[in-house]
Every structure is written in structure tokens, then in C-alpha cells.
Image (cartoon, rainbow, N blue to C red):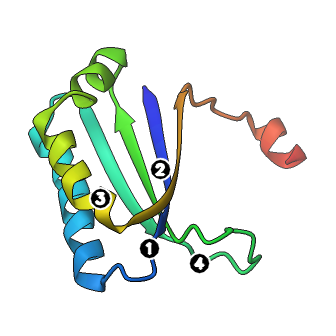
Amino acid sequence: MIRHILLIKFKDQATESEIAELKALFEAIPSKIEGVVAVEWGVNDSPEGKNKGFTHSVLMTFADEAARQRYLPHPEHDALKVVFRPILEDLIVLDYQSNPKRLTNKEKLCT
């Protein structure tokens, strides 16, 4: 699996309805693009104050590399960009291979 993380900083003039529209588009992606397993939308609620203006996140899970390669040039991804770009101040994108490790009971006690 591949995790695709977006950290989002919206422009000050971005409206709640524009952000809600973007959220709905992201959340519809798994039903429209084969191999996109899940999409999670999040709003920062960290009390640490270290988000540097990034207020929202998206965590997308691809089944495999082929799914990521289908997503990137897909018309639904392009439709996201049409809504996203005008309200976007800054964006961080990070992808990584997910290989979850199950902790043993001993490892759980040590953490």
C-alpha cells in the first residue's frame, strides 16, 4: 500500500463552502478511481501550535503503485485541482510505502 499525505494551507479568503466542496470531491475519489482504497479528511486540532498555518490534511491510501499511477493523470484528480488551486496558499505532499508492523506484546510494553 502507498499512503499519500497532503498538508493544506488555504488562502485567507477561502470560504467554508469552497473547502466543503473540496472535501466532498476528495471523499468521492475511492468510488471513482480503481485502487484508491480510502481517503481521510482531517482538520488540525493539535494543541502544540506547530502547524505553521497548515489547517487541513488528506490521507489517501493506494492499493499499490499501479493505483497511484492511475490516480495522478486521472480526470477526477484534474477536477480536484480546478477547485483546489484557487483557494490553496501552500501544500506539502508526502508519499510513503506502508508496511504496517504488528507489535508483539513485549514491544507494546516498551513503548
Residue 82's x, y, as percent? 20, 54
Dots 2, 3 in contact, CB < 8 A: no
Marking on residue 84: 3
Residue under label 2, please give it. 6
Whichever of callouts 4 and 1 sits on the residue coming sooner in the sequence is: 1
Whichever of callouts 2 and 3 sits on the residue coming sooner in the sequence is: 2
Which of the two discs, 2 and 4, sits closer to the camera? 2
Residue under label 1, please give it. 11
Q: For mark 4, give the secondary structure.
A: loop
Residue drawn at (55%, 73%) of the image = 44
User: Looking at the image, is 15 positioned above or below residue 105?
Assistant: below
Residue 52's x, y, as percent? 68, 68
Q: Which amino acid does the dot numbered 4 rest on? A: Asp
Work out whether residue 29 or residue 85 is closer to the camera in this orientation and state it: 85
In the picture as drawn, the residue positioned furthest to the right comes out as 110
Q: Which amino acid does the dot numbered 3 rest on? A: Phe
Whichever of callouts 2 and 1 sits on the residue coming sooner in the sequence is: 2
